[in-house]
Image: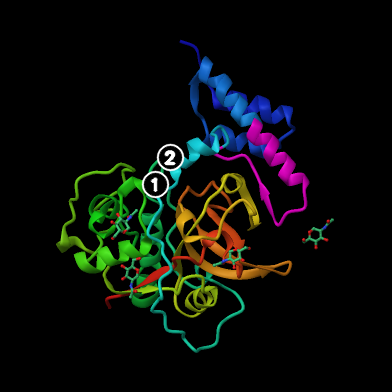
Amino acid sequence: MMIVSLVLFAASVTSAFGLSEKGNTLSHVQYNKAYDLKEYYQRLQIFTENKKRIDKHNEGNHSFTMALNQFSDMTFGEFQKSFLMSEPQNCSATKGNYFSSNGPRPDSIDWRNKGNYVTPVKNQGGCGSCWTFSTTGCLESVTAINKGKLVPLSEQQLVDCAQNFNNHGCNGGLPSQAFEYIMYSKGLMTEQDYPYTAFEGDCVYKPELAAAFVNNVVNITAYNEVEMVDAVGTRNPVSFAFEVTSDFMHYQQGVYTSTECHNTTDKVNHAVLAVGYGQENGIPYWIVKNSWGSSWGMEGYFRIERGKNMCGLAACASFPVPVL
Ligand SMILES: *[C@@H]1O[C@H](CO)[C@@H](O)[C@H](O)[C@H]1NC(C)=O
Ligand SMILES: *[C@@H]1O[C@H](CO)[C@@H](O)[C@H](O)[C@H]1NC(C)=O
Ligand SMILES: *[C@@H]1O[C@H](CO)[C@@H](O)[C@H](O)[C@H]1NC(C)=O
Ligand SMILES: *[C@@H]1O[C@H](CO)[C@@H](O)[C@H](O)[C@H]1NC(C)=O
């Protein structure tokens, strides 16, 4: 059977579109996928459509740019099936139990620069387990800020064990519900002791190996971005969920804003971690850690407009209070 690789067509298509040497190198190194000839032509067509959309967007006047990435040979439907949460989550308007710090709130903050508080960007692979990465990312940071030690924590324990709290492994879940699970199960193991597989498996949680603990779960009042700013600015990073639409798949850098997504609770399909905020050319934004590897977006991070409940980002934000 004849095998053709994405590297070949990425190289030929990108040179046809005049993409830089750097772009070609990136696709050589990281997105080397092999196809048979039939799929090659289907993928080439999808890739070409995506490339057209990216170029058109970049010719316009937008606060963010798009670029080819590891998803550029997929339709949004395919992407959605593999990488986003498949069922609507119970991200309903909660009253919230956040207490404002009443302290000075910085104009901008980035927890990555304040100390050793944020683990490297991880990769969820083809499993709708974003909610577990948002959860570990938040608990890792909260624990490091309060106890002084940064330890990567286990997503797989949440994928395998947190079902009783309305979480559904590779089909979705919510950080707030995962924090509840960790609180009641009395701990979360380390990444090293319970490594990630990107598949649902049997729960093999060993409480004696638990490395991080949750004393209480704090829910931000639904749609209250001021509380979110207070929490991130004066306490720690905050987990949130939002709606990913097809434009987000091609995000490269800048402040993401969309007219394609909704601001309602029933559409959220991806969970991530706000590690800071700032303002650029008059547009306030969140600095957000994603779980699609460090080659996506801004070294695995993205910025999204702040203050407008963009794509429902303030609908169900939360963070844990650690056991010290
Ligand atoms: C681009 O958009 C910004 C923000 O909407 C606006 O201030 C600026 O004038 C626009 N520039 C051009 C060249 O249209
Ligand atoms: C939402 O909550 C209800 C009641 O607890 C539960 O039956 C349902 O399965 C939940 N939905 C999801 C997607 O978790
Ligand atoms: C926070 O949200 C979770 C799930 O979304 C819920 O189970 C819990 O009761 C909420 N906690 C508070 C204090 O409202
Ligand atoms: C959602 O968007 C609509 C239309 O822009 C706006 O009127 C509404 O206030 C927004 N709701 C929330 C909760 O952000």
In this picture, residue 173 sits left or right of residue 279: left
Q: Residue beneath label 2, please?
A: 82
Q: Indicate the secondary structure of the residue bearing disc 1.
A: loop
Q: How many marks?
A: 2
Q: Residue at x 60, y 44 (%)?
A: 250
Task: Please say if 98 is above or below 179.
Answer: below
Q: Is mark 1 within 8 Å of ligand 2?
A: no
Residue 306 is marked as none
Q: Amino acid at mark 2?
A: Ser
Q: Amino acid at mark 1?
A: Gly
In x, y percent, where is residue 264? 51, 60
Q: Quadrant of the C terminus?
A: bottom left
- Proximity of marks 2 and 1: CB atoms separated by less than 8 Å: yes
Q: Quadrant of residue 178?
A: bottom left
In x, y percent, where is residue 309? 57, 66
Q: Quadrant of residue 215?
A: bottom left
Ligand 2's quadrant is bottom left
Q: Indicate the secondary structure of the residue bearing disc 2.
A: helix
Magenta residues (range): 49-71
In x, y percent, where is residue 38? 52, 16
Q: Residue beneath label 1, please?
A: 128
- Does the magenta-highlighted stretch encompass residue 40? no
- Does the magenta-highlighted stretch encompass residue 52? yes
